Image (tube, rainbow, N blue to C red):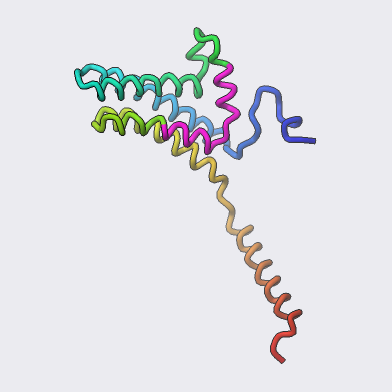
Amino acid sequence: MSSEATAPAGKPEDDGMTWWYRWLCKATGVLGGVSCAVAGVWNCVTVNPLNIAAGVWMVLNAFVLFLCEVPFCCQFIEFANAVAARADKLRAWQKALFYCGMALVPVVLSFSFTTLFGNAMAFAAGVLYGLASLGKKGDAVTYARLQHQKQGDEERMGATDGGPE
C-alpha cells in the first residue's frame, strides 16, 4: 500500500513535525504577513522608486503568506483554497526556500530598517520550516547502539581477514 493511499483525503503526508511546531510555523508565518503588510505600506509612503518597489513586494509577500498559511482570511478569492492545498503539499524545505527568498528580495531592493524588520518574521517562518526539514533529533541511546554495533562489525571484519598471528 502506498503512503498516498494511507493518508487521509484532506491531510498532507506526515512530514515529521509535531502539532505544536506546525502551529508555531503557521503563527510565525501569520505574524510575518502582518509585519510585511504594515511595513510595506509604510515603505510605499516615499518618493524613492526602489522603496516603493520594495513596499509593493512586501505587501505581495504578506498576501502570499496569508494565502499559504491561513487561507480562511482570503475567502473572497476564488483560487485561495486551491493555492492553500498546493502549499500544504509542499515539503518543509521547499517552503523554507520560498519564504526566505520572498523575504530577501525587498531587503536587496532597498536596505532600510523598515524592509529589514518588516521581513524579519517572514524570514523567521522560512527558517523554522528549514529546521523542520532537517528532521527529528535522534536520542543518545539509539546513537550509542549504532556505535556499538559498528564497533562489533569492525572487530568481526578484522577477525575474518586473518589478522596478525
Instruction: Tell me residue 51's x, y (percent).
Output: 25, 24
Residue furthest left in the image:
47
- Lateral position of residue 150 relative to residue 119, left or right: right
Instruction: Tell me residue 14's x, y (percent).
Output: 64, 35
- Lateral position of residue 139 relative to residue 129, left or right: right
Q: Quadrant of residue 47?
A: top left
Instruction: Name the foreground residue: 155 vs 163.
Output: 163
Residue furthest front in the image:
49
- Lateral position of residue 132 relative to residue 102, left or right: right
Q: Quadrant of residue 84?
A: top right
Residue furthest bottom in the image:
165
Instruction: Tell me residue 85's x, y (percent).
Output: 59, 22
Image label count: 0
- Of the 4 image quadrants, the one containing the N terminus is top right
Q: Is residue 84 magenta?
A: yes
- Lateral position of residue 65 relative to residue 79, left or right: left
Q: Which residues are magenta?
A: 82-101
Name which residue lies at 55% across and 13% down. 79
What kind of secondary structure does the magenta stretch mostly adopt?
A: helix
Q: Is 41 situated above or below 103?
A: above
Residue furthest right in the image:
1
- Of the 4 image quadrants, the one containing the C terminus is bottom right
Name which residue lies at 49% across and 37% down. 129
Instruction: Tell me residue 59's x, y (percent).
Output: 36, 19
Instruction: Name the foreground residue: 9 vs 164.
Output: 164
Q: Is residue 48 magenta?
A: no
Name which residue lies at 57% across and 37% down. 18
Name which residue lies at 58% across and 17% down. 82
